[in-house]
Image (cartoon, rainbow, N blue to C red):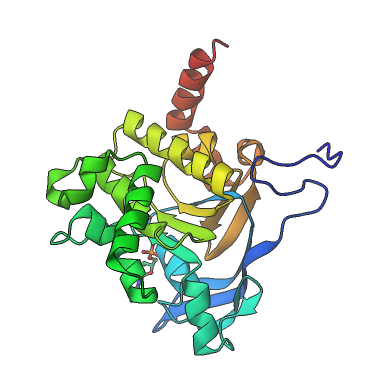
Amino acid sequence: METNGATHPNGAELGGEPEVVISAEDVTVAFGDKVVLDKLSLDVRRGEILGFVGASGAGKSVLLRTILGLTRKRSGKIRIFGIDLDTVSERDRVAIDMRLGVLFQHGALFSSLTVMENVQVPMREYLDLPRKLMDELARLKIELVGLPPDAAAKFPSELSGGMIKRAALARALALDPDIVFLDEPTSGLDPIGAAAFDELVQKLRDTMGLTVYMVTHDLDSLFSVCDRIAVLGEKKVMVQGTVEDMLASENAWVKSYFRGKRARQLDLTTRQEHGA
Ligand SMILES: Nc1ncnc2c1ncn2[C@@H]1O[C@H](COP(=O)(O)OP(=O)(O)OP(=O)(O)O)[C@@H](O)[C@H]1O
């Protein structure tokens, strides 16, 4: 790749590798006798959109939960912003947590709270701000994710699927995190809604310098917005690289996933859209 001191859209200098913000090293997670992750290693770099894929049940959610400290690992090391989570003080752990935003696949929003109140949940948990300021900040986040101002007073039951995802993203961004974790963010959305969500994620990365860790099955997302893809299989990250690397991989699962019938159809559609 040509460097010439150029700057990547995410602000990272291309001359040197951007900083590793998440590092998993030889991580093993097991439930009783069942080993789900076995000495798995993965680095995530500042400003990248990493797509994390793997067969259903491979352990994608388990790794996500382990990185977030919600599932206990049996061995290995996880560092976030270079800090070892096993030895971090409670105070520093809270400081790290505040820099992470999470959009869980199913835990979208609290149904009894309005969108505005949902977005304010992390603010109430971590910050002590006057009500007016919290309202102002929440309105900014709601606007940032492309929701109309009147969405603020609505309850989740009054929103479409795409709006719920955006509201959940606004909540994940409430504390201006450095890293957002998105677990299947486009599942349940129609292709147009999913593409719009992908565009939003890319725009946020470009403008805010976010690092995005996205668990997804969505080939469209992988092809259109991910800088790098990591494939979970055989309890490890078995292949990682760009879309081109995936298309060139001889790994059987990667081959059938990225070059299977569904992928070929997608490739054809993309080519037609670009007039190729
Ligand atoms: N708390 C738990 N106790 C026991 N087994 C668990 C627990 N959490 C996850 N597992 C097991 O770990 C394996 C990996 O699950 P995980 O949910 O991470 O898969 P996944 O790759 O996210 O799948 P999907 O794409 O279907 O969401 C599964 O076999 C699951 O049953």
Q: Position of residue 125 (x, y in %)?
A: 33, 75
Q: Nearer the viewer, residue 267 or 235?
A: 267
Identify the residue at the far top of this view.
Answer: 275
Count of marks placed on residues: 0
Q: Nearer the viewer, residue 56 or 176?
A: 176
Q: Is residue 101 above or below residue 152?
A: below
Q: Nearer the viewer, residue 93 or 37?
A: 93
Ligand 1 found in image quarter: bottom left
Q: Residue 23, located in which quarter of the rendered image?
A: bottom right
For image coordinates 32% across by 50% down, the residue present is: 139
Q: Is residue 108 left or right of residue 269?
A: left
Q: Position of residue 174 (x, y in %)?
A: 39, 59
For image coordinates 75% across by 41% down, the residue present is: 7
Q: Position of residue 113 (x, y in %)?
A: 17, 60
- Specify whether residue 246 is in view: yes
Q: Position of residue 57 (x, y in %)?
A: 38, 60
Tell me the quarter of the image containing the N terminus: top right
Tell me the quarter of the image containing the C terminus: top right
For image coordinates 51% across by 77% down, the residue present is: 95
- Specify whether residue 58 is in view: no
Identify the residue at the far right of this view.
Answer: 4
For image coordinates 33% across by 62% down, the residue present is: 134
Q: Is residue 159 left or right of residue 52?
A: left
